[in-house]
Amino acid sequence: QVMTGFGTSGPSPWGELLTLAQDETGERALLERLLDLWCGAHGASAAALYMDRRGSVEQVAAVGRGLPVLIAEEALRQAEPGRLRLPGGWLLFSPPGLPGAGGSGGGNDPLPLLLASALKSMRLRQELKEQQFQVNYRVVELEALYDVGLAVAATLDLDRVSEEILLRAVSLLDARRGALYILEDGRYRLDRTFGGEAGRWFAADDPVLSGFLAGSETA
């Protein structure tokens, strides 16, 4: 049996693709199978699907070898592999200049459309995961602020409150080390540390400290 548009003979791959599409954990396997079919239909030795990122494109699935994992946008058009633009990404393949690889195969090749659809689905899943992470992180932040507020209201012990603030800050930032300073007489005095030592004093007008607090310098 010959499948129109796939350029392959043998059993239909539609059932296999449908099974992979219905399995949420098989998303990458679906992309790789589509790429494998595309290589078979166009005689490519390797093909990879890329998703648009900020200033670059990142590989999300590939078959064969030799295609880069990350490519800057400005370098993409000078890339040696052949390329096909898809909504939200690119299909790169080698060797370049394959017959029919630059288009839709005379309108009978469903693979570019399937690849574009699968790429869009992957992007939507990633965006949902990122949004859910932000929501969960915000909940953790609010819980930490609430706990610190309870600690402040429950005691007048400055040491206990300071320790609670430092531990919560280190936890929220997923940091390995932390230090809490108190502003006194125009300079910051070290109150306590977590995970390592720190300088005992910093001048409040120290330009390095100001840059660090503004996010333009590293500790």
Image (cartoon, rainbow, N blue to C red):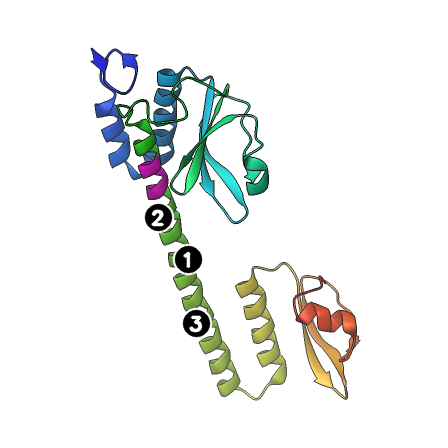
Does the magenta segment cover residue 117? yes
Residue receiving disc 1: 133
Q: Does residue 192 show up?
A: yes
Q: Give how far apart the Cα atoms at labels 2 and 1 are.
A: 14 Å
Q: What element carries label 3?
A: helix
Does the magenta segment cover residue 88? no
- Residue 82 x %, y %: 49, 25
- Camera-near label (2 vs 1) is 2
Residue receiving disc 2: 124
- Residue 95 x %, y %: 50, 18
In the shown orientation, is residue 65 left or right of residue 188? left
- Camera-near label (2 vs 3) is 2
Residue receiving disc 3: 143
At label 2, the amino acid type is Leu
* Image quarter of residue 190: bottom right
At label 1, the amino acid type is Phe
Name the residue furthest front.
Answer: 106
